[in-house]
């Protein structure tokens, strides 16, 4: 591929990141109560004012990361919105205690009263991501110590005692290693360690544990990534055991690759690329209509999730990051070809040229099926993180100083 | 419409009911542990052996109802399977106590160990349906007293104290009147009352309460049915308040009509037909591609459920029953036209001429998107109940003795 082509990608991606940031700055800030509206229609119109804690945390993180690492986003408006989001989380993310345990809500009202809580760790994870990056941008230690406090709580739930999550124990439920959990923790380890020797030591064993847990999902003699395995890394029976999520595997791929590069682990680099990028892409790409399927069954049964054949924005975002990072680390042209293939599908299907930002949910044929820009699970996160990561990777490949 | 056309419908529907029963008798019986497999692929192959309590209860009910009321299904095989299903439920439906309260599981392993429980009343509702109909078929009073015992527990959770359901109270959560709950209870009242003066008296006030609760969902000056309203019957804000489910409204329609006929309530008959049949059908029918949408937003926003535009088998089943019952009660030709319209879409899209039974999940364009015949939410219920009800209604219209 010529330098001109790489330049073309880079310029398009840079412009798309600017448009995406503009969209959310314009439509998502709640000036009255702080935090972010995320239920935004095609043109940015608010269609619901509930605030989803995952998305609050992710937007704070993304704003702070852009502010900290890219000069053109170092604006008072972005900093102010991130701080207001962080304060909203500090004041309102925590639901009333349930069975003696405090958990973050999953969503809260516009003013911050808890509406719903999940019995999983993800609201807390995105809360940690937000607090830590906010600490880096503001220099305020209270945010960092809050991040570490909650991180330790999450690790306790995951590795020591899950009872505080409020999930009843059921005799027929097999204890799971669901890939989402070690992936998410690895992402948090990466976040908390950056530039901090003490925390890097503190979380070093946790990082290794996460990698080990993720690698247990390579199954069937290395031919498939399965989302759920037993606690000792065996395949589980039934739909749950055969469940695959190609976008998730690709995301795990770049998390692992990043970790491998930082730790100089060549074997893990190869595994990340061959098993968590090439394999799920090959299995998950729709040969007829293009795009990545959302869910699959490794034996080819029809998944029971109604949305299994839809093409969602975020798996494509993760694939773009994975293949570009893979290419950066290996110069393997296969990976750049895959990047081009995903780029071409993504940029002809997801961005909305009229109102900006991306549609999130296409049907199998690639037609927009849900036309909002933000919803309960789509906020300011996967699109800008992808564009941000890709811009930096392309700058690196082009020999430019990293985007600023 | 000519008598010949009605005969045509009747014969097709009768044949389709036979094929459907054959499919489930052949593929779903667990001869070893009792109960029913419901995860059945296109050709009946088992792809998961979990047992879903909703579907166990529904299949017991449907088998018993067919056995009791249609001579051609009065076979030892059907009775035996129903009893084994009932015994499986008695032994295995109940999950271990949580916070001092006993609830039915949502699904159990093949051998009957609880895997998951929901914090709602529906597993228990289908359990009651099964027990009561089993009592009618077998004459065994233990089943009937179990039905009444659990019914009273459900009514306690719904009307007196929901804390036993295990849902944490959240300060931002508005207490809801979700239409599913009074609908389901009205269905149970109808089941328990049949031919029993004492129970009819016991549940008479409950029946009135259910009707009142359902009617609260007629909103916007009588122009729309909304799935969720406040406890005092007001529209709620946001997506939750604007949510519509046309198939569900149509199902409520025939539940209400049945109640109105039994109680000789002409006003309620009109409301059931105009508000719960004509309105949701008009709003929910896809004018481009045909078929009923799964979910809608009353203001025309895009719903946030990924599957909103899919065409599911069961709303079409409910529409067929609703319009045929409406026509039977009123002789209004508009209703027979609607029946024909839904019949035509349904019979050209859902039945599988190759392996029998119906596909459940089509995309917006009417193409089969999930090709299994049974899954976690599709069992031996909506298809046979629809065919059973319609066969009887058509027999009535044709002046035959009710199907036997």
Image (tube, coloured by chain):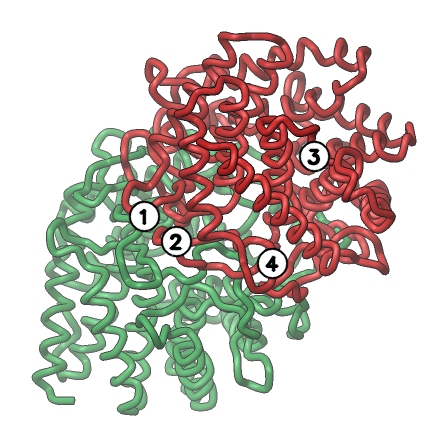
Chain colours: A green, B red
Residue farthest left in this picture: A4
The residues tagged by marks 2 and 1 sit, at their Cα atoms, a distance apart of 7 Å
The residues tagged by marks 2 and 4 sit, at their Cα atoms, a distance apart of 18 Å
The residues tagged by marks 4 and 1 sit, at their Cα atoms, a distance apart of 24 Å
Across and down, in percent, residue B191 comes to: 72, 25
First reached walking from the N terminus: tag 2 or tag 1? 1
First reached walking from the N terminus: tag 1 or tag 3? 1
Q: Nearer the viewer, mark 4 or mark 1?
A: 4
Q: Which mark is residue B366?
A: 2
Q: Nearer the viewer, mark 1 or mark 3?
A: 3
First reached walking from the N terminus: tag 2 or tag 4? 4
Local crowd size for mark 3, using a 10 Å CA cut-off: few (<14), some (14–19), many (≥20)? some
Q: Which mark is residue A302?
A: none
The residues tagged by marks 1 and 3 sit, at their Cα atoms, a distance apart of 34 Å
Residue B211 picture quarter: top right
Where is mark 4, residue-wise?
B356
First reached walking from the N terminus: tag 4 or tag 1? 1
Local crowd size for mark 2, using a 10 Å CA cut-off: few (<14), some (14–19), many (≥20)? some
Where is mark 3, residue-wise?
B403
Residue at left 77%, top 58%? Answer: B110
Where is mark 1, residue-wise?
B289
């Amino acid at each position: 591929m010529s330098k001109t082509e790489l330049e073309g990608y880079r310029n398009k991606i840079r412009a798309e990141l600017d448009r995406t940031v503009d969209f959310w700055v314009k439509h998502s800030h709640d000036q009255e109560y702080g935090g972010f509206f995320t239920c935004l229609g095609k043109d940015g119109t608010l269609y619901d004012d509930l605030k989803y804690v995952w998305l609050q945390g992710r937007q704070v993180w993304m704003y702070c990361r852009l502010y900290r690492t890219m000069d053109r986003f170092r604006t008072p408006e972005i900093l102010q919105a991130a701080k207001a989001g962080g304060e909203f989380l500090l004041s309102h993310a925590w639901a009333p205690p349930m069975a003696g345990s405090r958990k973050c809500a999953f969503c809260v009202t516009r003013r911050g009263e808890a509406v719903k809580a999940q019995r999983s760790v993800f609201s807390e994870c995105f809360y940690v991501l937000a607090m830590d990056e906010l600490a880096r941008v503001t220099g305020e230690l209270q945010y960092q110590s809050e991040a570490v406090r909650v991180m330790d709580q999450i690790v306790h739930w995951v590795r020591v005692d899950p009872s505080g999550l409020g999930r009843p124990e059921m005799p027929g439920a097999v204890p799971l290693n669901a890939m989402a959990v070690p992936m998410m923790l690895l992402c948090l380890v990466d976040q908390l360690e950056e530039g901090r020797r003490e925390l890097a030591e503190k979380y070093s064993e946790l990082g290794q544990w996460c990698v080990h847990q993720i690698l247990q999902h390579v199954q069937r003699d290395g031919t498939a990534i399965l989302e759920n395995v037993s606690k000792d890394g065996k395949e589980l029976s039934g739909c749950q055991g055969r469940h695959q999520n190609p976008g998730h595997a690709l995301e795990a791929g770049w998390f692992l690759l990043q970790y491998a590069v930082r730790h100089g682990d060549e074997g893990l680099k190869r595994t990340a690329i061959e098993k968590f990028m090439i394999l799920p892409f090959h299995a998950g790409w729709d040969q007829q209509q293009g795009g990545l399927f959302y869910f699959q069954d490794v034996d080819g049964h029809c998944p029971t999730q109604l949305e299994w054949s839809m093409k969602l924005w975020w798996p494509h975002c993760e694939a773009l990051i994975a293949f570009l990072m893979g290419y950066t680390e290996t110069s393997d042209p296969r990976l750049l070809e895959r990047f081009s293939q995903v780029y071409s599908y993504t940029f002809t299907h997801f961005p909305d040229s009229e109102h900006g930002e991306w549609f999130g949910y296409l049907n199998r044929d690639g037609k927009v099926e849900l036309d909002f820009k933000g919803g309960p699970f789509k906020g300011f996160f996967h699109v800008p993180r992808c564009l941000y990561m890709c811009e930096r990777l392309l700058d690196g490949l082009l020999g430019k100083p990293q985007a600023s």
